Amino acid sequence: MANRIPRTPVREQDPARRATNFEEVCLGYNQEEALLEASRCLNCKIPKCQGKCPVHIDIPGFIASLATGDIAGAAKVIHKDSSLPSVCGRVCPQESQCEGACVLGIKSEPVAIGKLERFVGDWAIEHASDDAPDKAPSNGRKVAVVGSGPSGLACAADLAKLGYEVKIFEALHKVGGVLEYGIPEFRLPKERIVAKEVEAVKKLGVEIETDVIIGRTMTIDDLMDREGFDAVFIGSGAGLPRFMNIQGENLNGVFSANEFLTRTNLMHAYDDDYDTPIFAGKRAVIVGGGNVAMDAVRTAKRLGADAIIVYRRSEAELPARVEEVHHAKQEGIEFKMLTNPVAILGDDKGWVCGIECVEMELGEPDESGRRSPVVKEGSNFRIDCDVVIMALGTSPNPLIKHTTKGLETNRRGCIVASEDGATTRPGVFAGGDAVTGAATVILAMGAGRKAAAAIHSYLTPS
Ligand code: FAD
C-alpha cells in the first residue's frame, strides 16, 4: 500500500562541512526520489493540505501528475496558483500549512509536499522554454509597482500577462526583496533560483528600474500625475528593524539582523572577492527566535563565530520553521531558551563585551495565544560576547506613508488595504509585508496576485 512507504529522506550537505560554507544545505530530491515520494500521496477526497495552503495550490493534483512522471503537467498545475514554487518549496512553513494537515501525518510522516514542490519548480526553471510567454496583447494601460519582492514580482507578472505595461521601481541595486537581501544563499540560491524567477518576470515584458526610492527619487503622486501610470501597487515590504531600547544598544558590535544579513547576502561580505566589511566576532549572541534569527545565527556561525540564540519563550513557541531550527542545531548553534536581555555591556573603547540577561518563565497566554514570558526576579546573569544581533521583527518603512497624501496606515505603520489590496487612495493598491507586517513569502505572493486582479477590475470597469 502506498501509505506504507516511509517518507523519502532528502539529501543534505553534511552539517560540519556546511557550517563553514554558504552553499545550499538541502540538496533536494532527484527524479527517482520525487516520484517515489509522490507515490505516497493518498489523493484524499477532501484534500486538507490544499485547504491549509494560503494560495490553495491543487496539491493532490500536482502530486498525481508527478507520480505518473508528468513533471511538466505538475508544473502547470502549481503555476495556476503560485508563481514562485522553487522559492516556496524551500522557505514555506510547510509543517504548519500543507504538511501539517496531511492525513498521512496522523499515524506516520506527512508527504514531503514542500520538497516535491521544490523539485517541480526547479525542473520548470531548468526546462523553461525559449518561446515567447503566453500573454494578452497590449491594452495601452500602465501600472507602476513599488518594490521587487515576492508581492511586487507576482503582481507585475499577472498584470503583464493581462496586457498591461508594467514597470517595477526597486530601491536597492538588486531585484528580489527579502529573497535577495535577507534569506541567505545556503537556504535560497540567488543565481540558480531567485535570478531565474526574476528573469521569467522580465520575459513577460516587465521593466525593472533599480536604485529608485519611491518617496525620495519620485513620489507616488509623481508616478500617477507626471509619469502617466494608471494605477500603482505598493509592495515595499517591512524592512525597518525593531530594537529593544535597552542600555548598550548603541555600542559597536550591535547589529540589526537586517543589516547583518544585507551585508552578507546582498553585498557578499562572505565572499573574498568583495570588499564589504562584516564583523561576526568570536562569540555572537542573536536575540530572537524567528526565521530571521535562525538565518542570522547560522550566518554568524559560517563567518567563524560561536553563535548563540537567546529567546525569551521556550522551544515550543519558536516561530521559525522547524527545519531551520533542526538545521541550526545540527550545525552546532547553542539555544538559550527562556532568556531575555536587559542590557548590552561595553568595554572602555565602546565595543560590546557581553550581554546581561534574565531568566524567564511562561505565564498565561497573551493575545497571540502563546504563553507570555515572565521575568524570574533576581535571575540576572551575563553571557560574554563581542557581537549582538537583534532579530526582533520589522515594520514597514514610513517613507511612502509620509510622502503619499490620503494613504492611511494603522498604528503598526502598515498600509490599510482591503482584502484585494485597495488602499484608501483611489488607484493605489498594496500587499505583502507592507500591509500585513512581516509575514511569509507565500502570503506576499498571494497578495500581489490578488491585487493584480483588483487592479485589472479597477482599470477595466464593466
Ligand atoms: P519584500 O520581500 O520585503 O520586498 C520589498 C521590496 O521593496 C524590497 O526589495 C525593498 O528594497 C523595496 N522597497 C522598499 N521601500 C521602497 C521604496 N520606497 N521604493 C522602492 N522600493 C522599495 N518567509 C517565509 O515564508 N519563509 C522563510 O523562511 C522566511 N525567512 C525570512 C528570513 C529573513 C531574513 C527575512 C527578513 C524574512 C523572511 N521571510 C520568510 C519573510 C518573507 O521573506 C517576507 O514575508 C516576504 O519577502 C515579503 O514580501 P514583500 O514583497 O511584501 O516584501
Image (cartoon, grey):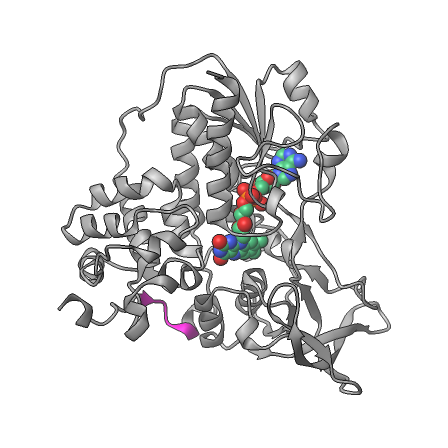
Residue 441 location, x and y as percent? 49, 49
Pick the residue in front: 175 or 367: 367
Residue 323 location, x and y as percent? 43, 67
Which corner quadrant of the image does residue 159 belong to?
top left
Residue 275 location, x and y as percent? 61, 51
Q: Is residue 154 magenta?
A: no
Above or below for 415 versus 105: above
Please report the residue visible at 70 percent of the width from the left and 43 percent of the height from the top.
397
Q: Is residue 12 magenta?
A: yes
Pick the residue in front: 441 or 307: 441
The residue furthest bottom is 378
Pick the residue in front: 336 or 66: 66
76 displayed left or right of 287: left
Pick the residue in front: 2 or 153: 2
Q: Work out whether residue 271 can be spotted.
A: no
Quarter the N terminus occupies = bottom left
Above or below for 56 versus 328: above
Residue 34 location, x and y as percent? 22, 58
Above or below for 343 versus 227: below
Please report the residue visible at 62 percent of the width from the left and 63 percent of the height from the top.
368
Q: Which residues are magenta?
A: 11-16
Please report the residue visible at 77 percent of the width from the left and 34 percent of the height from the top.
402
